[in-house]
Structure formats: C-alpha cells, structure tokens
Amino acid sequence: MIYLKPVLILLLILFSGFSLENKKPAYLTKWVVTKGCSLKVGGSTNINKFNCIIANYSKPDTLTFYSNNTSESLKITGSLKLDVQNFNCFNPVMTGDLRKTLKSKEFPKLTIRLLSLSRYPEFNNKLNTIKGVVTIELAGTTKRFEVDYRFVSDGIKSINLIARRQVKFSDFDIVPPRRIGGMIQTNNELDVEFNLNMKVID
C-alpha cells in the first residue's frame, strides 16, 4: 500500500498528458470557392513594370476550419491548385517567358495551401484585417509564408478574402528571366495577391 499511491499518481499524470496530446482540433465550419477568384503577380525589370494574372479561377475547392482549443487561431485544411499555363501578362513574349521561367511544362500546377487564420472573421463587420499562414508550391519547391488578409463580408454567408504578400523568385530556386543577352533583367521581388470569393456551406 505504501508504494501504491505514487504508482497511481504517476499513471494519472501519464494518462492526462497522453489525452492532451491526442486531443484533436474541433470542427468549426466549411467554406467553398465560388466564381471570380484570381491570382495576380506584379514585378519589374530594369526598364519597366509588369502584371500577370490567372483570372476566373472557380474550381469548387473546399476549406475546412477547426478551432485550436488552446488559442484563438484556427487551423485550416484545403488548397487551391492553379494552372501555371493560365498566367496572362497581356504581352505574348512576357507571358511565354514567365511560363517558361516557372517551369510550367515540368510543374504545371501552382498550389496554395491555407494552413491557419489568426481568428475567425466577424461577419457583421463588413471589413476585417486578419493574419494567416499559407504554403505556396511552385516549380517543385514549397515555401511557407505569413500573409495579411483583407476580409469583406455581405453580413450573411458570402465572403471575399484578399491576401497580399511579397515573394522572390529565389524563394523557389528560380532565376528571374532575362532577355536580349541580359540587357533586360527581371528583378527578384514579386508582389502576389490572391483574391478568393467564398461561401459558407456548413
């Protein structure tokens, strides 16, 4: 009996720790992608600026939200897979250069995975700013980024989520394109904006 209490206490501690570690995030809700989504990329060369876009992305991708239990932040599962070949820079030569630089034949998809939000948006507030975490997979390389979202709601179940982030070609082990023997050089920095139209379905 003398040694029974310490053994029981140890078992209780181990069991409670095991339970906490295996406690899964609680399901919260689901959003589905609707029409009118886009991905914009802006950059510059030593002589001008350029903008390229994948427009009218509308595949019915679903994002599932889970509460974190230990903080206000939310876990997300879900991703967007865009065709690199759909980039349009409104200039045939530039469009071809960008697609080639991003290795569209070898890696045809640009994948954005949404991992978390700092908090759940307030639907009664028409304009919110929220922080989040995503991974971007491009040209065979995946990088993790923090992003700033601007969240606009109609107050019911329709949502517009706009995320902005500066990335670099070198983040994805890509050499910026050059033309005419290197006389025109593309700068390493890119301004990325993805615009998502979503609807709460659950």
Image: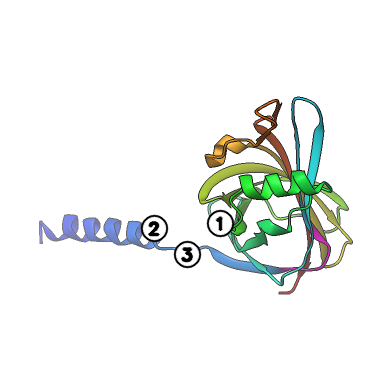
* Residue underneath mark 2: 21
* Residue located farthest toward the bottom when viewing the structure as drawn: 202
180 up-or-down from 38: above or below: above
Q: Name which residue type carries label 2.
A: Glu
Give the CA separation, mark 1 to mark 2.
Answer: 37 Å
Of marks 1 and 2, the one in the foreground: 1
Alpha carbons under labels 3 and 2: distance apart: 8 Å
x%, y% of residue 171? 56, 38
192 left or right of 174? right
Near-viewer residue (99 or 193)? 99
Residue at left 74%, top 53%? 87
Image point (76%, 45%), residue name: 93
Q: Give the alpha-carbon distance from disc 1 to disc 3, as whole Å.
A: 34 Å
**Label drawn at residue 178:** none
Query: x, y percentage for residue 141?
Result: 51, 48
To which quarter of the image does residue 4 belong? bottom left
Q: Position of residue 29 (x, y in %)?
A: 67, 68
Tell me which amino acid carries mark 1: Phe
Q: Which mark is drawn over residue 107?
A: 1
The kind of secondary structure element at disc 2 is helix
Range of residues picked out in magenta: 32-37
The disc label shown at residue 24, or none: 3
Location of residue 82 (image quadrant): bottom right
Query: On the image, which quarter does residue 1 sit in?
Result: bottom left
The amino acid pointed to by label 3 is Lys
x and y percent of residue 159 in the render? Answer: 81, 61
Q: In this view, does 138 lie to the left or right of 154?
A: left
- How many marks the image carries: the answer is 3
Question: Pointer 3 and pointer 2: residues touching (CB < 8 Å)?
Answer: no
Quick one: SS at disc 1? loop
